């Protein structure tokens, strides 16, 4: 496969509903899309970096510049036998995993289209349907949150995750549990607590949560290993797992009992598979996290979620929860049983609506080889 061109595009899409985490509230998403041209075939991917460096140090302008200045020159004009080789070509660049993931995943997408194979099969997936959960942000009132939970349960979602932070945690969980004693419930702190709040964090145990996601610092594994033995609730790490070695270390020192895999956070499909495999070898379940992706990124999350150790419902929800109109066709739909059916079509099984993307584009740049 010869890598002939790389196109970067920024689009802007308003969210159907605002989304608030312990690091802030957003109403719209600036989205960076990447497409590659290889042997006349186009592959698409989404760089999941946010508009601000709050979830991670990457943000969409840093990703754009990194791709333009360093990643594109490392791959353009090269002939590769397998998409995963691109990871090696880009390895000289440290970090910038979301940017690398977008480039690598676009190549996987192109390879799947070129080979007329479903992407999930190329990735080694097995599951023919995947279980879905929802992540519900911090609201203006607990009543508003309860209403949203009610709606998502009625839609069939199999796991409710709420965002927590000091002041929006025990009081909220208490109200949820008194209304729904048995639903599968988890929470995500996005690093809102510190180790000296262990007594407070121990109070989460009474709510029978599936997990508490990333309670401590975003760059920490060790202190989570000091916290986990003091909790009955399983810790799930998100922000602090950057690659398979992090996952192995976290599991070996007992820092978590569950791992959230985000393909952007770990630098692409090849590393995401390694994280999956390391966890499987240690009998640690994984699930697919989300970054409020458009359909392009969402379709890739769905393909990844077919790997067998994705044993817990992912933050992989229907297009209509996020967007009035998605940029793929068909849109992602979740059944009344809370499942997404996996398509047998080549590629992702979702067509990228280039006409719609063109309308939403606020900037665009194509990088090509000179030779
Ligand atoms: O921590 O999982 C997270 C969204 C943006 C940044 C970080 C996170 C999230 C979510 C939303 O929880 C998941 C989704 O529905 O895409
Ligand atoms: Mg998270």
Image: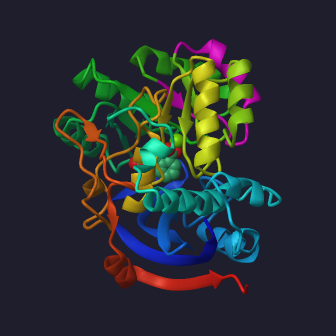
Q: Residue at x 50, y 19 (%)?
A: 203
Left or right, 166 with reference to 282: left
Image spot of residue 19 (x, y percent): 40, 55
Q: Nearer the viewer, residue 148 or 95?
A: 95
Q: Position of residue 270 (x, y in %)?
A: 62, 45
Residue 49 seen in the current view:
no
Q: In this orientation, which residue lies closer to the viewer: 11 or 116?
A: 116
Q: Which residues are magenta?
A: 211-232
Look at the image and tell me in which quarter the N terminus lies.
Answer: bottom right
Horizontally, residue 156 falls left or right of residue 136, namely left
Residue 164 appears at what percent x and percent y?
A: 47, 38
In the shown orientation, is residue 70 left or right of residue 272? right
| 294 to 302, vertically: above or below | below
Mark count: 0
Residue situated furthest right in the rendering: 92
Name the residue rendered at 51%, 28% in the picture.
Answer: 212
Display coloring: rainbow
Residue 169 in which image quadrant: top left
Of the pair 243 and 230, the residue shown nearer to us: 243
Q: From this viewpoint, is residue 338 visible? A: yes
Q: Nearer the viewer, residue 116 or 251?
A: 116
Q: Residue at x 48, y 71 (%)?
A: 41
Q: Position of residue 56 (x, y in %)?
A: 64, 54
Give the vertical position of 299 relative to 237 (above or below).
below
Which residue is at a point 56% across and 21% down the rendered structure image?
Answer: 284
Q: Quadrant of residue 236?
A: top right
């Amino acid at each position: 496969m010869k890598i002939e061109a790389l196109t970067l595009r920024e689009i802007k899409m308003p969210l159907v509903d605002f989304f608030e985490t312990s690091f802030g509230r957003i109403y719209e998403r600036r989205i960076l899309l990447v497409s590659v041209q290889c042997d006349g075939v186009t592959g698409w991917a989404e760089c999941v970096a946010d508009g601000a460096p709050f979830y991670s140090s990457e943000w969409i302008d840093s990703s754009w510049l990194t791709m333009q200045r360093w990643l594109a020159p490392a791959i353009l004009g090269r002939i590769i036998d397998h998409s995963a080789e691109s990871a090696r070509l880009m390895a000289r660049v440290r970090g910038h995993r979301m940017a690398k993931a977008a480039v690598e995943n676009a190549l996987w997408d192109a390879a799947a289209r070129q080979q007329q194979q479903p992407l999930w099969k190329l990735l080694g997936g097995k599951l023919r349907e995947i279980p879905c959960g929802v992540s519900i942000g911090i609201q203006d009132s607990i009543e508003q949150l309860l209403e949203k939970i009610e709606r998502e349960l009625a839609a069939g979602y199999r796991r409710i995750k709420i965002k927590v932070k000091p002041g929006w945690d025990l009081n909220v969980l208490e109200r949820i549990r008194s209304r729904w004693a048995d639903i599968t419930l988890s929470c995500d702190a996005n690093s809102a607590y510190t180790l000296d709040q262990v007594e407070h964090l121990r109070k989460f145990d009474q709510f029978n949560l599936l997990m508490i996601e990333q309670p401590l610092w975003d760059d920490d594994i060790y202190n989570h290993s000091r916290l986990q033995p003091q909790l009955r609730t399983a810790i799930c790490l998100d922000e602090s797992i950057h690659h398979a070695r992090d996952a192995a270390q976290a599991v070996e020192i007992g820092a978590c009992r569950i791992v959230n895999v985000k393909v952007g956070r770990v630098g692409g499909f090849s590393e995401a598979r390694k994280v999956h495999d390391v966890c499987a070898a240690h009998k640690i379940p994984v699930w697919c996290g989300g970054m409020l992706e458009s359909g392009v990124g969402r379709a890739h999350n769905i393909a990844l979620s077919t790997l067998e150790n994705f044993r817990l419902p992912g933050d992989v929800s229907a297009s209509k929860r996020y967007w009035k109109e998605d940029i793929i066709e068909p849109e992602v739909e979740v059944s009344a049983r809370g499942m997404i059916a996996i398509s047998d079509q080549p590629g992702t099984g979702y067509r990228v609506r280039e006409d719609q993307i063109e309308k939403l584009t606020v900037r665009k740049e194509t990088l090509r080889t000179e030779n």
